[in-house]
């Protein structure tokens, strides 16, 4: 059950604005499980209203068509944008000011694919059809424009990739 798992990782529990923005996304995504057109329309209209409220109150724009894994933590909600074609794996952390989106107007559907256990620092931008591997750290204010291999760190503008040493 995503609600309970999301709540378990929410830093402020039920008071976490990021948690509620994520629940609005999950509610909107729920409609894809219904075949009845009337039910889908009703849920879709309700989602549009809730999504606008989440944008205003929580400071997060999460497209309903994005694919978000389990236990996403949104710390310090505010100015967060997640593109509809993006994919985010399990156990990721997103902080304030993060944009996960397209890079160019002539490629509006190009969006990032983010692996599991990715920690995205405040103000980071991950743009275009890039792949971020598992267990990656994206530094604060980094601008990621290229693929980041697993178990790496990406820092700077544009981001440069630093391989982490694997204990062993």
Image: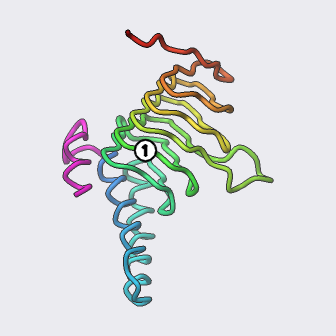
Q: Which residue is nearer to you in this view: 123 or 132?
A: 132
- In percent of width and height, residue 168 lies at 38, 9
User: Residue placed at 34% from the left, 66% from the top?
Assistant: 27
Residue 42 in the magenta stretch? The answer is no
Q: Main secondary structure of the magenta part?
A: helix
**Image position of 4 (left or right of 120):** left
Binning the other alpha carbons within 10 Å of mark 1 as few (below 14), some (14 to 19) or many (20 upward) gives many
Residue 15 in the magenta stretch? The answer is yes
Q: For the view shown, which residue lies furthest in the front direction?
A: 168
Q: For the view shown, which residue lies furthest in the right direction?
A: 106
Q: Which residue is nearer to you in this view: 44 or 150?
A: 150
Q: Quadrant of residue 10?
A: top left
The number of numbered discs placed on residues in the rendered structure image is 1
Q: In this view, does 27 lie above or below 111?
A: below
Query: On the rendered image, what quadrant is the N terminus found in?
Result: bottom left
- In percent of width and height, residue 85 lies at 58, 56
User: Residue placed at 67% from the left, 43% from the top?
Assistant: 128
Q: In this view, does 65 lie above or below 129?
A: below
User: Residue placed at 44% from the left, 35% from the top?
Assistant: 96
Say which element carries label 1: loop
Q: Quadrant of residue 145?
A: top right
Q: What stretch is highlighted in magenta?
A: 1-17
Way the structure is coloured = rainbow
**Image position of 115 (left or right of 126):** left
The residue to which callout 1 is attached is: 89
User: Residue placed at 76% from the left, 46% from the top?
Assistant: 104
Q: Is residue 5 above or below residue 84?
A: above
- In percent of width and height, residue 12 lies at 21, 38
- In percent of width and height, residue 137 lies at 47, 24
Q: Is residue 168 above or below residue 114?
A: above
């Amino acid at each position: 059950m995503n609600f309970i798992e999301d709540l378990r990782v929410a830093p402020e529990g039920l008071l976490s604005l990021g948690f509620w923005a994520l629940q609005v996304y999950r509610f909107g995504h729920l409609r894809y499980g219904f075949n009845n057109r009337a039910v889908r329309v009703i849920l879709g209209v309700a989602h549009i209203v809730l999504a606008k409220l989440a944008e205003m109150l929580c400071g997060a724009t999460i497209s309903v068509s994005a694919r978000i894994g389990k236990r996403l933590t949104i710390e310090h909600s505010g100015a967060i944008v997640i593109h509809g074609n993006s994919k985010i794996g399990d156990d990721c952390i997103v902080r304030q000011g993060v944009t996960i989106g397209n890079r160019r107007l002539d490629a509006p559907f190009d969006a990032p694919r983010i692996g599991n256990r990715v920690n995205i620092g405040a103000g980071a931008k991950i743009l275009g059809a890039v792949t971020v591997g598992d267990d990656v750290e994206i530094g604060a204010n980094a601008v990621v424009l290229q693929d980041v291999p697993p178990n790496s760190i990406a820092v700077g503008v544009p981001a440069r990739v630093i391989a982490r040493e694997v204990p062993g």
